[in-house]
């Protein structure tokens, strides 16, 4: 799998809300085939950055390209062929509560391919349900009937509905117990490897960062202050990076990974 070509390019991005500047001259590149973790303190604009890339937030300035296509200033119809190539898991899953899991999965398919027959829609939904690690009977259930971890998997199933090449995940393991979070991390890795996905992953979970991320981008001071592997980040003299990765939780997460590597 190639990890050299850039799938996402963000250049000189500026996001502001009134007098509050969230991003100023932010640059970021996401490579094909990688799982890129995005971290930063509260208020650094991690979700705003993701929303800017997928077109839900209009930046004040800057350039964003996805698959070499410019995304800023294009209307929905112009960008449709690009948007069809990515899937998104929002915080909490963001499932439609009045639709079953299968119907949630079918929403993006109906939007982009309105002529598909019901039998094929049901077949695709069943396949995506299984792919996400849910039992087959979950397809007929409503989100309220699922556990938190199952709702996350249902959200992944919907994000995979259009066979995307790029996956955006916003805090995918938030609220999960350690065992559930580890299984979800494993699912992300398996999907990346099996489907050749590129993954843009916002997280606070240090275990996730150590376990599955190829590189980590650090947001601070209204921009990406560093990007690289965790060992590369630890070599930098930056207060927040050192406090985050070298604090008690960071050291514990690193220790767990060393134990798992030694046992494998």
Image (cartoon, rainbow, N blue to C red):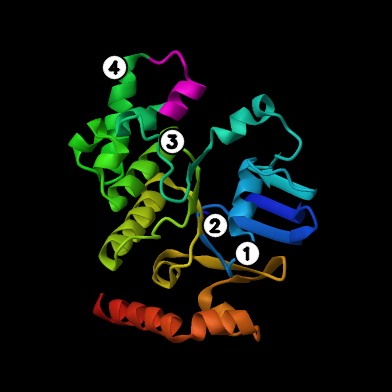
Image height check: is 35 above or below 61?
below
Residue under label 4, please give it.
119
Point out the tag, 3 or 1, that comes first from the N-terminus.
Answer: 1
Point out the tag, 4 or 3, that comes first from the N-terminus.
Answer: 4
Residue under label 2, please give it.
3
Check residue 132 for magenta coloring.
Answer: no
Mark 2 secondary-structure assignment: loop
Residue 75: horizontal and vertical position, in percent? 71, 29
Point out the tag, 1 or 4, that comes first from the N-terminus.
Answer: 1
Task: Identify the residue at horizontal 42%, vertical 55% (top origin).
Answer: 172
Kindly report which numbered mark, 1 or 2, lies closer to the viewer in this rendering: 1
- Is residue 223 among the parts visible in the rendering? yes
Task: Identify the residue at horizontal 32%, vertical 36% (top origin).
Answer: 128
The local crowd at label 1, few if under 14, some if 14 to 19, many if 20 or more residues have their Cα within 10 Å, is: few
Residue 129: horizontal and vertical position, in percent? 29, 38
Disc 2 to disc 4, C-alpha distance: 38 Å
Mark 4 secondary-structure assignment: helix
Point out the tag, 1 or 2, that comes first from the N-terminus.
Answer: 2
The magenta segment: 107-116
Residue under label 3, please give it.
163
Residue under label 1, please give it.
43
The local crowd at label 4, few if under 14, some if 14 to 19, many if 20 or more residues have their Cα within 10 Å, is: few
The local crowd at label 3, few if under 14, some if 14 to 19, many if 20 or more residues have their Cα within 10 Å, is: some
């Amino acid at each position: 799998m190639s990890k050299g070509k850039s799938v996402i390019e963000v250049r000189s991005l500026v996001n502001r809300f009134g007098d509050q500047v969230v991003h100023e001259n932010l640059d970021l590149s996401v490579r094909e085939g990688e799982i890129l973790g995005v971290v930063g303190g509260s208020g650094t604009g991690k979700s705003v950055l993701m929303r800017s890339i997928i077109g839900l937030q209009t930046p004040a300035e800057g350039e964003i390209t996805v698959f070499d296509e410019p995304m800023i200033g294009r209307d929905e119809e112009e960008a449709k062929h690009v948007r069809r190539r990515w899937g998104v898991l929002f915080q909490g899953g963001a499932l439609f509560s009045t639709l079953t899991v299968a119907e949630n999965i079918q929403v993006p398919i109906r939007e982009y391919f309105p002529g598909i027959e019901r039998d094929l829609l049901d077949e695709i939904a069943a396949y995506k349900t299984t792919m996400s690690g849910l039992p087959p009977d979950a397809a007929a259930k409503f989100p309220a009937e699922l556990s938190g971890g199952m709702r996350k998997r249902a959200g992944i199933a919907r994000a995979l509905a259009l066979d995307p090449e790029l996956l955006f995940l916003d805090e995918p393991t938030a609220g999960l117990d350690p065992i559930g979070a580890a299984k979800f991390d494993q699912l992300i890795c398996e999907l990346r490897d099996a489907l050749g996905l590129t993954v843009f992953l916002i997280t606070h979970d240090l275990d996730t960062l150590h376990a599955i991320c190829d590189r980590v981008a650090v947001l601070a001071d209204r921009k990406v202050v560093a990007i690289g592997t965790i060992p590369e980040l630890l070599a930098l003299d930056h207060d927040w990076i050192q406090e985050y990765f070298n604090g008690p939780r960071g050291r514990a997460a690193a220790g767990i990974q060393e134990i798992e590597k030694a046992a494998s």
